[in-house]
Image (spheres, rainbow, N blue to C red):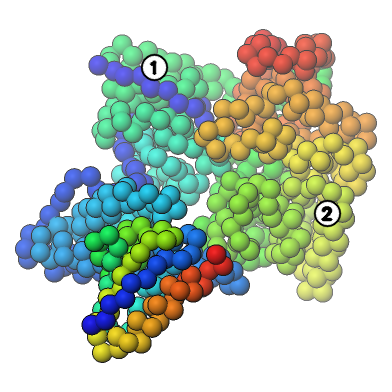
């Protein structure tokens, strides 16, 4: 019989396929043994991974200098891996009891876990978490070929991947390996993995808590992220039903696609700019004539999943790709915004691991701290633009002082380019992200100093409501329709209209069809979204009479009941 | 072989960082060093075993050292415990 489970849908598209279960928590649950003549090989394998992990820890702790806190922590982790009795016990299990290496390590973890359970002292008890981390890393190294790289193999081709957590790199790998969809038991709809899966048109459902217990390897699944459901082992009737919807959807998409190159003009003749967001220069492939340019190119991924920094030349090539593809349309390149929920890799880490990275050294704050890194990026941007329309977007602006300092650095970058006799574009537009409430409130002042503003709703909502969108406990309180949020967005749009400053919404809200009319009603005339959403949003814009929405919008702004507000938005 | 009774003096007890210090001190010597609390033994070279003793502030432990450099080893271990593992409180 089929079972229906629910979760948070991320990207659209029904998919039907077989499940492949890949959990990161890889501790063995069942015993496994090796034959007598394999014991030697098995214990060598085990010692090898212990030594390998030791080297890895040493390597990463040597990368962080002048930070005693982290060094101490790494040394402690190192002494866990180096533990004499742990090594002796594990080897004893292999040598004298013919345990496989992974079962020897896993079962040693279970016995330690038991001993730790009796410990009263909470502080000591918590160290079991560190030990577990080490065990997982050891097992990952042991199974490196089997599990770690599974997403980049054809094992996931045409499969729906069931996992606990997923990183942006995993999503890219799954996309390249032609996986059908992704279901995770944790995570959040606005995490970067989710954003990436959306732009790559990879169907995904997150926070499907029951997926661990219910979905088994090889199960047939129907996933429908838009309706937040997964059907495990569907019957014939269900299959038939969803296959029908699937083909109807494909037809609908085709019809959106037919008209997608037409301009987005509302019924009351207001021209709306619909631009696209990019994460990776590879996504340039998804670009076509349907968009009015690139409204946001997040440059973070150039810096991630690597040990070194991208050179000016490498960045120049990545940005050039985008300029070449869009011809004469504007291209908005956002300078590096690390921190918050993005995984910060070693190459761009500064100082201590912040307790609250969302309020820490990120965006322009980081750039003003690592000035050279910022200048290298600016130089690559100015060179790549050639005759194009370059718009430089600065994230996390809080004060006017930061804008002035960023301008100074851009001028310095230009001087350096002149000295180096490299050709570059002199003319560019400067814009700031409106994501810190302070800059939204001060938008009238700040608008005099910039050419455009871009409202990043994801972070703006997080900061206005004090909600961490990746914290499972409070993620449900993350509400972009909260009247305080809408009021502030409206204020920024109106200010920009008065001061004749371009304003775009580039957050998740811009690409979700339930908010399209809401944003049009608030007076917005420029959207930037993941390319996948453009055809449908454009067609929705063409069906809307923007001015007629005004009175209804006022009712929404005054409505403090969540359910009622949602209803008002849906019936706009 | 020499044996000595000691008391844990620091606020946090024999927690991870303190245990790591015991391990690194023990590694400086050739002698075997065993720490016992409530009948449970721990090799002083194993951070996990030391943690499992769950020795909080005020607990009584005994240290057993056996080997050619047992006198120096005992002295260093005793100093570490009495200095509260170089912690403030």
Q: Earlier in the sequence, mark 2 or mark 1?
A: 1
- Mark seen at residue B20: none
Q: Is residue A325 left or right of residue A235?
A: right
Nearest to the observer: residue A173 or residue B55: B55
Q: Which label is found at residue A242?
A: 1
* The image quarter in which residue A221 lies: top left
B80 or A340, nearer to the observer:
B80
Furthest-left residue in this view:
A36
Q: Is residue A40 visible?
A: yes
Of all residues shown, which one is farthest toward the bottom? B68
Residue A347 drawn at (x, y percent): 58, 64
Q: Residues within 10 Å of mark 1 (few under 14, many from 20)?
A: some
Q: Residue A453: horizontal and vertical position, in percent?
A: 81, 40
| A286 lies left or right of A55 | right
| Residue A532 point in image, percent of width and height | 57, 32
Q: What residue is drawn where x is 55% and y is 38%?
A: A471
Say above or below: B60 vs A187: below
**Which residue occupies 82% across, 37% down?**
A440
Image point (51%, 34%), residue name = A472
Secondary structure at badge 1 equals helix
């Amino acid at each position: 019989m089929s079972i229906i489970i629910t979760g948070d849908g991320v990207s659209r598209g029904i998919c039907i396929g077989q499940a492949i279960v890949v959990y990161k928590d890889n501790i063995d649950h069942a015993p496994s043994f090796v034959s007598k003549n394999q014991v030697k090989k098995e214990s060598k394998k085990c010692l090898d991974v212990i030594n390998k992990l030791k080297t890895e820890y040493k390597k990463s702790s040597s990368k962080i200098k002048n930070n005693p806190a982290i060094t101490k922590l790494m040394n402690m982790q190192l002494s866990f891996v180096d533990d004499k009795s742990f090594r002796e016990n594990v080897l004893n299990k292999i040598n004298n009891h013919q345990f496989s290496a992974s079962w020897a390590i896993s079962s040693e973890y279970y016995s330690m876990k038991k001993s730790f359970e009796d410990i009263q002292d909470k502080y000591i008890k918590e160290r079991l978490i560190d030990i577990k981390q080490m065990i997982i890393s050891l097992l990952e190294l042991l199974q490196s070929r089997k599990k770690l790289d599974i997403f980049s193999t054809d094992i996931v081709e045409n499969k729906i991947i069931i996992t606990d957590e997923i990183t942006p790199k995993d999503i890219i790998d799954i996309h390249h390996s032609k996986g059908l969809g992704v279901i995770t038991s944790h995570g959040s709809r606005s995490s970067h993995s989710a954003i990436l899966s959306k732009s790559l048109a990879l169907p995904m459902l997150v926070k499907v808590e029951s997926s661990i217990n219910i979905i088994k390897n090889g199960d047939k699944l129907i996933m429908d992220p838009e309706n937040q459901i997964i059907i495990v082992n569907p019957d014939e009737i269900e299959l038939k039903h969803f296959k029908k919807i699937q083909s109807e959807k494909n037809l609908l998409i085709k019809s959106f696609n037919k008209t997608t190159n037409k301009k987005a003009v509302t019924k009351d003749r207001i021209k709306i700019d619909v631009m696209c967001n990019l994460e990776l220069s590879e996504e340039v492939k998804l670009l076509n004539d349907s968009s009015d340019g690139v409204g946001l190119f997040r440059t973070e991924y150039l810096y991630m999943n690597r040990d070194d920094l991208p050179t000016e030349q490498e960045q120049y090539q990545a940005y050039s790709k985008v300029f070449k593809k869009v011809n004469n349309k504007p291209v908005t390149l956002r300078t590096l915004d690390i921190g918050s929920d993005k995984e910060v890799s070693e190459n761009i880490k500064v100082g201590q691991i912040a307790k609250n990275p969302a309020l820490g050294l990120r965006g322009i704050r980081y750039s003003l701290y690592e000035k050279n890194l910022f200048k290298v990026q600016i130089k690559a941007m100015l060179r790549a633009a050639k005759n194009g329309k370059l718009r430089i977007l600065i994230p996390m602006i809080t004060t006017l002082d930061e804008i002035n300092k960023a301008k100074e650095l851009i001028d310095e970058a230009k001087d350096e380019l002149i000295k180096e006799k490299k050709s570059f574009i002199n003319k560019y537009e400067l814009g700031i992200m409106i994501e810190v409430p302070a800059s939204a409130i001060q938008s009238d002042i700040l608008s005099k100093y910039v050419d455009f503003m871009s409202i990043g709703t994801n972070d703006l909502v997080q900061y206005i409501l004090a909600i961490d969108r990746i914290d499972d406990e409070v993620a449900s309180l993350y509400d972009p329709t909260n009247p305080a949020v809408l009021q502030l967005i409206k204020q920024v749009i109106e200010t920009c209209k008065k001061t004749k400053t371009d304003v775009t919404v580039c957050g998740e809200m811009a690409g979700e069809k339930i908010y399209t009319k809401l944003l049009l009603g608030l007076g917005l005339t420029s959207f930037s979204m993941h390319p996948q959403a453009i055809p449908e949003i454009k067609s929705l814009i063409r069906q809307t009479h923007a001015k007629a929405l005004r009175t209804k919008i006022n009712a929404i702004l005054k409505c403090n009941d969540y359910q009622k507000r949602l209803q008002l938005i849906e019936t706009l | 072989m020499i044996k000595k009774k000691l008391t844990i003096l620091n606020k946090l007890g024999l927690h991870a960082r303190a245990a790591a210090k015991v391990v690194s001190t023990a590694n400086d010597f050739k002698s075997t060093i065993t720490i016992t609390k409530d009948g449970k033994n721990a090799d002083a070279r194993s951070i996990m075993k030391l943690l499992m003793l769950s020795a909080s502030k005020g607990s009584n432990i005994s240290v057993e050292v056996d080997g050619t450099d047992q006198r120096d080893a005992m002295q260093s271990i005793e100093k570490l415990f009495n200095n509260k593992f170089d912690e403030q409180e």
